[in-house]
Image: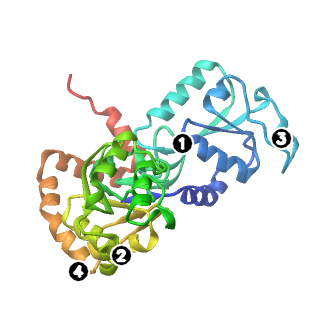
Amino acid sequence: MNYRSISDMNDAILRNLHRLPRDIDLVVGVPRSGILAATLVSLTANIPMTDLDSFLAGRIYTSGITKRWAGLDRQASEMRKILIIDDSIIGGTAMRNAREKIAASGIEGDFIFAAVFGLSLQHEETDIVFEAVPHPRMFQWNFMHHVFLEQCCVDIDGVLCLDPAEDENDDGPAYEKFLAEARPLLGPTRKIGWLVTSRLEKYRKLTEAWLAGHNIRYDHLIMLDLPNKAERQRLGAHGSFKAEFYRKSDAILFIESEHEQAQRIAKLSGKPVLCVETNMMNLPDPISLPALQQAARNLPARLRQINSSDGRKQAVKATARALLGERGYEALKNRVKRPA
């Protein structure tokens, strides 16, 4: 799983600023995630910014009182060289729609179209792609809304809700109150494959009630079947319990709240773990026994995929892209007549 955080986005922008013209007058973000990219470019290069809809309406964001210079005070009608940017591009629909809206508006200018992340460094709808990030991939700003979530194990405390405070974690009435009233954190908009938590099995009903109350959909709720908190602490079962389930499951990713547990789960399972605390992907040692076991376990499925009709098509497409480049591949696609 290829993962990029907001920090990674900022780094990609900094590494690629030299590729942009030095005389850009305005940065326009394609809603919604492109506004994040536009903000980072605007702050770094100290040039005005706005979002696409505001740009079409002739509105530019105000620039505050620091780092002032004359270019920050110009009107939209004075902007000539304009960067249109999105966080990422795959098929190009959002960028194509942006182009069409700008053309329909009659606004004239020298437009540069860019994306921070793409499947490759070239795309027919952009002039610049800053960094290639192939599938499978997730971003910090979309992983709780990603289609892959149905193939993930997800921790509860520290991910979906705040961790209990020390005085709430008494394995008694205070803890039960916490479970009923836990403050939500990251709200998924897609169904989760497996919720895997170190909460004790005896708290299942309270946990299920909270999840239902916050409209969190999931296929399975995996809890630790031990009698009490003291026994859980004695066994130190948090990370090993999660890792063992994850290792045996078909999940492709574990989303964990705490850094040390994330590292332990990755090590014991041989599979990647995304840590919410650090916004980093923890990867197992590729030659460790758990990782090699996972590779062997996945081999039959990979072979079946390659031998399938769709798998062969994907292999041909990958080869064509490698030989022709993205622009050449897109040009070839446009020339091939599809059957009616």
Q: Is residue 157 visible?
A: no
Crowding at label 4, few (<14), some or many (≥20) Cα neighbours within 10 Å?
some
Name the residue beneath numbered marker 3. 71
- Disc 3 versus disc 2: distance between alpha carbons? 51 Å
Mark 3 or 2: in front is 2
**Which of marks 2 and 3 precedes in the sequence?**
3
Name the residue beneath numbered marker 2. 264
Crowding at label 3, few (<14), some or many (≥20) Cα neighbours within 10 Å?
some
**Which of marks 4 and 1 precedes in the sequence?**
1
Above or below, 248 against 339 in this view is: below
Name the residue beneath numbered marker 4. 289
- Amino acid type, mark 2: Arg
Viewport quadrant of the N terminus = bottom left
**Which of marks 4 and 2 precedes in the sequence?**
2
In the figure, residue 173 lies in which quadrant? bottom left
Query: Callout 3: helix, strand or loop?
Result: helix
Q: In the figure, is residue 177 to the left or right of 147?
A: right
- Disc 3 versus disc 1: distance between alpha carbons? 25 Å
The structure residue drawn at horizontal position 73% and vertical position 32%, both measured from the top left corner, is 60
